[in-house]
Image: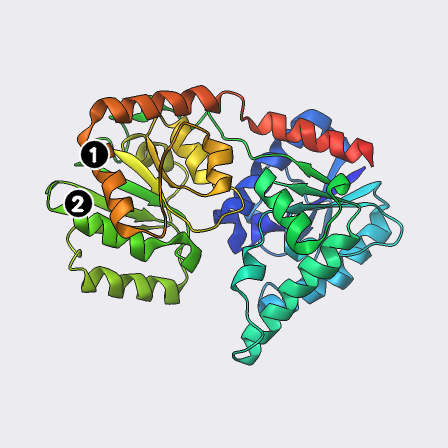
Amino acid sequence: MILIDATPLQSEHRVRGVGTYVYYLTRELTRLAGPSCAFFVATQDQRLLPEWVAPVHAVYRPHRPAQVYWLYNEWAIRQVVKKSHPQIFHATDFNGLVSLRDVPVVATLHDLTGLQTQTRHGNLSQRLSAWRWRTYYYEKLPAATHVIAISEQVKQDAIVKLGLDAQKISVIPHGVDTDSLSPRHKGHGLYGNHPPYLLYLGSAEPHKNLPRLLEAFRLVASDYPDLSLYLGGRWQQRDQAGLDKVIDDLKLGDRVKILGYVHPEDKPSLLANATAFVFVSTAEGFGLPILEAMASGVPVVASDIPVFREIATDAAFFVSPNDVAHLAKGLQQILADQSLRDDFARRGLRDIESLTWHSVAVKTWAVYHER
């Protein structure tokens, strides 16, 4: 039996890339292997679990503060493993990674942004958070039996920055749900009749580079008076306040629409009806929203960083994430040329065919059986 940590579906991660990964991985593994998979969940918030995640192994644990939540796993997961005797434990997120003496541990590594953005200075909470990330990257990951990296870039970062052995890392890129996301939603749904808009979906953390995106949008907005910029995602209050100030300073209040959390039933329409999808992060472990936009038949403007080149190949219009003028020029080119937009949309639909969540499950199952 494989014991899989499904708790990201019960925390704030459920509306982020990690939650999407766990949602589809657990669904496809259940279809593939059935009772050979069991799931570790928390006793609280079980109403958030999809129907295929039967709470076979549930323990109570606090979600906040994050430092306590993380430390509590050291006890909680060991107790579950002791009772269930799995052949393998899969830590799908950093919070669930613990070292187990008698059970092989497979850990999914999503990115190294936690290491890059943390500091040893600041208040107590910030210092504890920095310690938590250092412990995860430099002690817990090296102790895992095997690591699944979600991109080749993450694998190389783990080798170079963390000193992990390349032989213990498998690259399994994310998939995309083409059953729900497709061009057929264009002209339909909640956003079917909206005036033209550029779209961003994700968090508002600093590496998402939203202030530069807003500056670039300001430079092209006067040429397209009917065009809006839609920003969607569940944001931290401090990030929201910072972006509100940037929008006010740039006098973009009537041109930028902050959507907040986008419900899954509205997402296909939101994506398919966008003029273009814009994702200009300075660093990422993968970039799942890019795949979702490609599956929706929408042209993508993306940062020219290695991981986006890896996942989008020639199916995105690449811009420098650190150069506002270059970013604005890219937006201008995409907005001015319908044939260019159509070409990138076709390329995206071409590339997306092989990126399924079923293939992610098959490759993950192979990793389990190689241990």
In the image, 111: left or right of 103? left
Query: Label 1 belongs to which residue?
Result: 335
SS state under label 1: helix
* Whether residue 116 is situated above or below residue 298 in the rendered picture: below
Give the percent coordinates (x, y) of residue 287.
47, 41
Give the percent coordinates (x, y) of residue 345.
34, 24
Query: Label 2 belongs to which residue?
Result: 220
In the image, 158: left or right of 275? right
Q: Outermost residue, right direction?
A: 102
Residue at the (60%, 38%) spot, across then down: 152
Residue at the (28%, 51%) spot, across then down: 324
Q: Quadrant of residue 116?
A: bottom right
Is tag 1's residue or tag 2's residue first in the polypeptide sequence? 2
Q: Between 176 and 333, which is closer to the camera in this rendering?
A: 333
Q: Between 301 and 234, which is closer to the camera in this rendering?
A: 301
* Whether residue 281 is situated above or below residue 313 in the rendered picture: below
In the image, 278: left or right of 352? left
Q: CA distance from mark 1 to mark 2?
A: 9 Å
Give the percent coordinates (x, y) of residue 197.
22, 39
Q: Are the two marked residues, 1 and 2, in contact with CB atoms closer than 8 angstroms?
A: yes
Residue at the (78%, 39%) spot, across then down: 2
Q: Residues within 10 Å of mark 2 (few under 14, many from 20)?
A: some
